[in-house]
Amino acid sequence: MEDRGKARATALPRTGFLARWIGWVALGESLGFLAPVLAEYIGANAWPDGVPLLLVLAGFAEGAVLGWFQVRLLRTRLPALASRRWVLLTSVAAAVAWAVGLLPSAWPAWQDWPVPARIAAGALAAVLLLGSIGLAQWIELRHHVPRAWRWIAGSAAAWAAGLAVFMAVATPLWEPGQAAWLTAAIGAGAAVLMAAAMALVSGLVLVRLLTEDRPAGHRL
């Protein structure tokens, strides 16, 4: 009975943190994604040629909002975590991810490359797109948890899940010639589901990282 009680006492904090992470981070990403939605709307109606630049800047804002929401909760477990550095790293990485994601449409010449070169470039772009935020956050996280490099892969998996959900929801609903407000509304709705999927996967990874014992003399 005593061992069972200890197991239950350990499981409850982990479950509670995961639930808070999912709700808090999903909210942060949903709010942050309003910046790209607004940028797309403004660009479509006022500055079509400036949409790529607006989206990259909006990605910076999205990352800042997401990073702020993440670090508010992370500091309850890692009080020494540098909040400003975490937010800055996340915002820069999000801007890079948007730039990488927009590169194929902004530079169509890649379509004339040989097939192996296109495959290699696509694979590299996917790695940069999915791994940029986790890699940037690892720069700070590695000072606080053991084997923090696993956050890079875990974060990439979380964003892969989130983007898959976004595309599955938004792509069938977006149509050519659609009103800008409707396109934005669909994007915002799909973003909420994307945020929830990303928060769930990243939360499962983070709980594992935070609950592992820190070995003596560990190196991150």
Image (cartoon, rainbow, N blue to C red):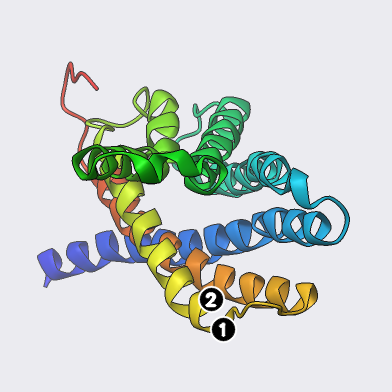
Residue wearing tag 1: 173
Tell me the quarter of the image containing the N terminus.
bottom left
Residue wearing tag 2: 170
Residue 16 seen in the current view: no
> What residue occupies the far bottom of the structure in this picture?
173
Tell whether label 1 touches label 2 (CB within 8 Å).
yes
Amino acid type, callout 1: Leu
Amino acid type, callout 2: Ala
Where residue 131 sits: x, y (%)? 36, 40
Where residue 23 sits: x, y (%)? 53, 66
Residue 22 seen in the current view: yes
* Left or right: residue 112 compared with residue 2: right
Where residue 188 sits: x, y (%)? 65, 70
Where residue 195 sits: x, y (%)? 51, 64
Q: Residue at x 22, y 45 (%)?
A: 115
Q: What element carries label 2?
A: helix
Judge whether 133 appears above or below 185 on screen.
above
Tell me the quarter of the image containing the C terminus.
top left
Between 89 and 187, the one nearer to me in the picture: 187
Between 75 and 136, the one nearer to me in the picture: 136
